């Protein structure tokens, strides 16, 4: 008889730790290298890009957890490209949401903060304004923007989960090889 006790998936936690560390290290290195030599306006565009990535992956993570597999079962039966990928995503919704919302979303948040610090430091040097005031103001504005966009994104994701999961699955299907089932 199977135990009703919940077990912790330490293997998944270890893998996600290593993946998060690797992605964060690479993106932080690239971000730090770029910010030192960039114009302030280009740095602001990169900041908005990180915010966009955080919001986009939050939308994907929410959509996968809310989507109904029945729609994609029907599509998979008709061999619609991407439907089997959608079913795999939905069957592993907890891991997909963890990766999208927590790993990518949190990394985007940290990198946004790093970009805010770099931008406010550059602006303080150029304008002579108080760097503490600039840093606090930019950090608050960036946090408020990211949080409000994620709130709108969650609402959008819940209302349009099927089309979002299907679109994302079709993109992923480009990079996967679907196995053809032989008929006997």
Image: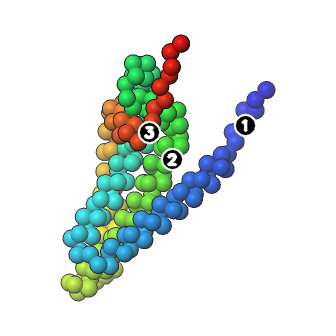
Q: Position of residue 56 (x, y in %)?
A: 34, 48
Image coords of residue 134 (percent x, y)? 29, 76
Which element is circle 2 on? helix
Number of residue marks: 3
| Cα distance between the residues tagged 3 and 1 | 36 Å
Residue 153 lies, with reference to residue 49, above or below; the image says: above
Find residue 184 and report its horizontal and vertical position in percent. Answer: 53, 13
Q: Which residue is mark 2?
A: 98
Which label belongs to residue 5? Answer: 1
Of the numbered discs 3 and 1, the one sitting upstream in the chain is: 1
Relative to residue 32, is residue 59 depicted above or below?
above
Q: Position of residue 40 (x, y in %)?
A: 23, 74
Q: Give the left or right position of residue 88, taking residue 145 as reference.
A: right
Residues under numbered marks 1 and 2 in contact, where contact means CB atoms less than 8 Å apart: no
Going by the image, does 65 lie left or right of 49?
Answer: right
Q: Which mark is residue 176?
A: 3
Q: At 20% from the left edge and 84% from the top edge, which residue is drawn?
A: 127
Question: Can you tell which of label 3 and label 2 is closer to the viewer?
Answer: 3
Residue at (36, 33) in percent of width and height:
166
Q: Is residue 164 visible?
A: no
Helix, strand or loop at mark 3: loop
| Res 66 quadrant in image | top left
Q: Looking at the image, is mark 3 or mark 1 nearer the viewer?
A: 3
Label 3 crowd bin: few (<14), some (14–19), many (20+), radius 10 Å: few
Label located before the other in sequence (1 or 2) = 1
């Amino acid at each position: 008889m199977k135990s009703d006790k919940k077990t912790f998936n330490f293997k998944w936690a270890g893998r996600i730790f290593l993946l998060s560390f690797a992605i964060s290290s690479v993106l932080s290195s690239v971000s730090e290298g770029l910010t030192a030599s960039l114009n302030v306006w280009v740095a602001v565009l990169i900041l908005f890009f990180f915010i966009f990535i955080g919001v986009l992956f939050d939308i994907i993570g929410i959509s996968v957890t809310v989507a109904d597999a029945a729609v994609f079962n029907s599509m998979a039966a008709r061999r619609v490209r991407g439907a089997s990928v959608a079913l795999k995503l939905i069957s592993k919704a907890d891991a997909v949401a963890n990766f999208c919302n927590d790993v990518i979303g949190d990394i985007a948040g940290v990198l946004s903060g790093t970009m805010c610090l770099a931008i406010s430091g550059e602006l303080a040097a150029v304008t002579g304004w108080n760097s503490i005031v600039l840093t606090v103001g930019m950090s608050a504005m960036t946090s408020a923007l990211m949080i409000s966009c994620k709130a709108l994104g969650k609402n959008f994701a819940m209302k349009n989960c099927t089309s979002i999961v299907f679109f994302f699955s079709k993109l992923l299907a480009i990079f996967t090889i679907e196995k053809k089932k032989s008929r006997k």
